[in-house]
Amino acid sequence: MSMPTSGTITGTPNGYCRSGNSHGGFDIANVTGTPIRAAADGKVTYLGYGARSGNMITVGHAGGWATKYMHLSKYNVANGASVKKGQVIGYMGSTGNSTGPHLHLQIERNGAIVRDASLIDDFRCGSSVTAGREISYAFPGLPKTGGPVTPPSSSYPTLQQGASGAAVTQLQNLLKARGYSVTVDGQFGPATATAVRRFQGNIGTTVDGVVGPKTWGALEARAAGSTTLKQGSSGSNVTALQKALNATMGSGLTVDGQFGPATHNAVVSYQKSRGLSADGVVGTQTWAALKGGR
């Protein structure tokens, strides 16, 4: 298995890091909208809402293993779907009995929570973890599916005020290309935060100044026109579509401007997850959803 998301460990099966009170899983805190990925290949066996768990997904794996992902803000997969290790299945939130945005990850075998010390060693209180990093625990009976997973959308990390580096430069260039006044300096300061909020307000998505998958996707999608695209299409609009799907869904598409089978499948997955007609054709409704940060 690999780490399903990035963030800071605030709880383990031994208890919450601050209080030590009883706790059944691993808490990884980050901002709302942070992508949540399947820890291993498997099948979605439950998708629904609980008063304590909030929006939750359960994935069943080989060898009697199961992983549960709780407090999600949004699902990115359907019940009964087969999923691959590293695939984005949802987004971090604070639904249910929660005091702030985080993922509650519960790892079980044959219906029992696993509390082995050697597993907990990978989730030390206060430590930072990165999505895709391989968990060192052996997981008996679970087939190996390769080494560490590099998240497909790693070039679109969740950003907020105080961040810096190449991803912020990328964000500032996109904002500038969309007509917003920002200095491209790689520093996510107040001016960049203001531009992000203005952009979010203008497209009608949540205005929080946090650049997550939906905001990244909308910024990329707005490089395109409104031309209807389908398998066989090519050109700059397809390039913008592929970037938007990678940002929003973690689709892992090769950005080549060619609308081939992989792009078609990614479009269908996006349409299904947003309740759109899943025909693989990018028309008015699909463009509106992508450009509107849905």
Image (cartoon, rainbow, N blue to C red):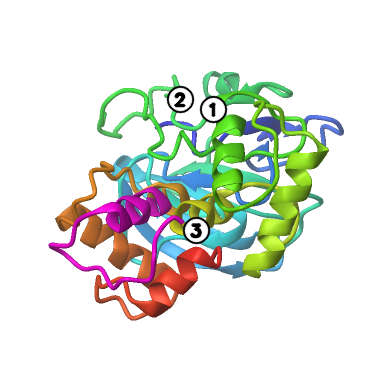
Q: How many numbered discs, if any?
A: 3
Q: Earlier in the sequence, mark 3 or mark 1?
A: 3
User: Which mark is on residue 130?
Assistant: 1
- Secondary structure beneath label 3: strand
Could you tell me the amino acid type at mark 3?
A: Ile
Residue at 25% over, 31% down = 145
Q: Position of residue 179 (x, y in %)?
A: 61, 52
Question: Please, what is the three-letter code of the amino acid marked with disc 1?
Answer: Thr
Q: Which residues are magenta?
A: 223-245
The answer, for residue 34, to whether it is visible in the render is: no
221, 210: nearer the viewer: 221
Q: Residues within 10 Å of mark 3 (few under 14, many from 20)?
A: many
Where residue 133 is drawn, which disc sits there? 2
**138 vs 216: above or below:** above
Look at the numbered discs 2 and 1 and tell me whether their residues touch, using CB distance below 8 Å.
Answer: yes
Which residue sits at x=12%, y=62%? 232
In depth, the one of 176 and 138 nearer the eye is 176
